[in-house]
Image (cartoon, rainbow, N blue to C red):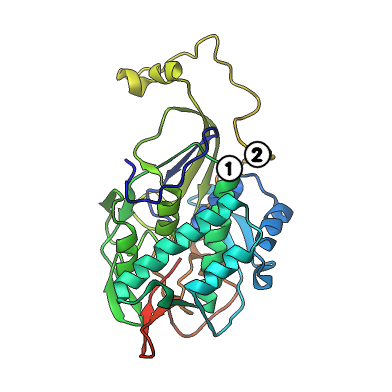
């Protein structure tokens, strides 16, 4: 299902099918890890895209690294950001995105995702969108996750994007406002219109950044679509959640013709495999609108927004803070105090913190 309330950004008329299956959650870091590996980017190519964001603070801040959970290989993000005490408003972020050297489509998707995020935070805290502000570290992390994911999504250029329903869980997160139940208010606002289901005791499984990206990318929600699978990766986050499959699958495939799709077992309803017709050949290439070396031997990890609406030791409980249980995300900085990513300024009065995590 596709929510009519999502932004109406037309998908390319041709391109691969993108599929995301997220049984344990999604985060901005997970989008980065999964899309980087699907796009086949090596470290220099990734650094080149990050440089186009136009923020020197982000140079050398990101690496997509190999990791594993339960001996299943994947990838995750190692992000090291500077520790800066200042605030960034939505107007500032709009200016930064506009001044960067993203593609037109990447810029459009970035601004759409940030707009969705700001509207959710503003509604929760009763302030104007332009009064929503982020602590600098949180802003840098969000800019990196949102803009890089948007640019990679634009590079891949899917003609169709299908996502599984999203897991949510009862839990508690601590923030500047005290204790909040999960999903936290901004996350819950961003999830409106999306299909969700409950899993036991995992806290926040979908981060605000991931939910905002989903709203910008406007997926259909449902089962795997008929396609010829060409590439798949597995993305891990910073937590291992017991009792559910960990990691998110990111996959690309070639759209099937109507005739071949009708031959699929799911379409026929008999559960039997269908032989490929003689006129259908598996091409050595693939129908991507870009060229790259897909050496995807390993499944790739994803930085779940698990436990997100992040309050970390510095306002963002980045999945990148740990590396425990075989997960990636080394945050490169250790903070001994907690604060949140963003807050809304209500005029000249006291700041209203708009808790935002990846």
111, above or below 246, in the image: below
Q: Is residue 184 left or right of residue 218?
A: left
The foreground one among 141 and 75 is: 141
Q: Residue at point 30% right, 72% down?
A: 124
Q: Residue at label 2?
A: 290
274, above or below 131, in the image: above
Residue 308 in sight: no
Q: Residue at point 41% right, 47% down?
A: 8
Residue found at the far right of this picture: 44
Q: Position of residue 210 (x, y in %)?
A: 43, 58
Residue found at the far bottom of this picture: 349
Q: Position of residue 48 (x, y in %)?
A: 71, 57
Q: Residue at label 1?
A: 156
Q: Residue at point 59% right, 20% down?
A: 282
* The quarter of the displayed image where residue 130 is located: bottom left
229, above or below 349, in the image: above
The answer to whether the residue labelled 2 contacts the one labelled 1, judged by CB atoms less than 8 Å apart, is: yes
The foreground one among 24 and 215 is: 215
Which comes sooner in the sequence, label 2 or label 1?
1
Q: Residue at point 62% right, 36% down?
A: 289
Quarter that holds the N terminus: top left
Residue found at the far top of this picture: 278
214, above or below 314, in the image: above
Q: Position of residue 161 (x, y in %)?
A: 45, 40
Residue 116 in sight: yes
Q: Position of residue 97 (x, y in %)?
A: 58, 64
Q: Is residue 172 left or right of residue 100?
A: left
Q: Is residue 81 left or right of residue 122?
A: right
The foreground one among 45 and 258 is: 258
Mark 1 crowd level (few <14, some 14–19, many ≥20, 10 Å Cα): many
SS at mark 2 in the image:
loop
């Amino acid at each position: 299902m596709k929510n009519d309330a999502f932004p109406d950004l037309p998908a390319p008329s041709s391109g691969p099918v993108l599929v995301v299956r997220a049984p344990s959650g999604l985060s901005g870091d997970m989008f980065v890890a999964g899309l980087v590996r699907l796009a086949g980017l090596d470290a220099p190519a990734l650094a080149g895209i990050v440089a186009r964001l136009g923020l020197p603070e982000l140079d050398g801040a990101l690496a997509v690294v190999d990791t594993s959970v339960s001996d299943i290989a994947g990838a995750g993000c190692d992000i090291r950001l500077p520790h800066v005490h200042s605030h960034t408003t939505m107007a500032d972020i709009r200016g930064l995105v506009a001044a960067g050297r993203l593609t037109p489509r990447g810029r459009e998707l970035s601004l759409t995702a940030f707009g969705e995020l700001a509207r959710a935070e503003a509604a929760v805290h009763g302030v104007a969108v332009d009064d929503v502000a982020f602590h600098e570290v949180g802003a840098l992390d969000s800019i990196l996750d949102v803009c890089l994911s948007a640019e990679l999504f634009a590079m891949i250029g899917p003609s169709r994007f299908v996502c599984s329903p999203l897991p949510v869980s009862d839990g508690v997160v601590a923030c500047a406002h005290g204790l909040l139940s999960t999903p936290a208010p901004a996350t819950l606002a961003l999830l409106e219109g999306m299909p969700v289901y409950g899993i036991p005791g995992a806290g926040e499984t979908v981060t605000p950044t991931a939910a905002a990206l989903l709203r910008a990318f406007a997926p259909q929600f449902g089962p795997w679509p008929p396609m010829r699978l060409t590439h798949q990766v597995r993305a891990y986050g910073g937590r291992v959640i017991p009792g559910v499959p960990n990691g998110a699958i990111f996959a690309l495939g070639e759209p099937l013709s109507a005739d071949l799709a009708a031959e699929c077992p799911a379409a026929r309803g008999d559960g039997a495999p269908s032989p490929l017709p003689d006129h259908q050949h598996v091409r050595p290439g693939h129908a991507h609108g870009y060229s790259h070396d897909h050496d995807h031997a390993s499944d790739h990890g994803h930085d779940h927004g698990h436990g997100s609406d992040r309050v970390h030791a510095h306002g963002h409980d980045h999945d990148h803070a740990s590396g425990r249980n075989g997960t990636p995300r080394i945050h490169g900085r250790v903070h001994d105090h907690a604060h949140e990513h963003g807050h809304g300024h209500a005029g000249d009065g006291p700041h209203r913190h708009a808790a935002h995590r990846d």
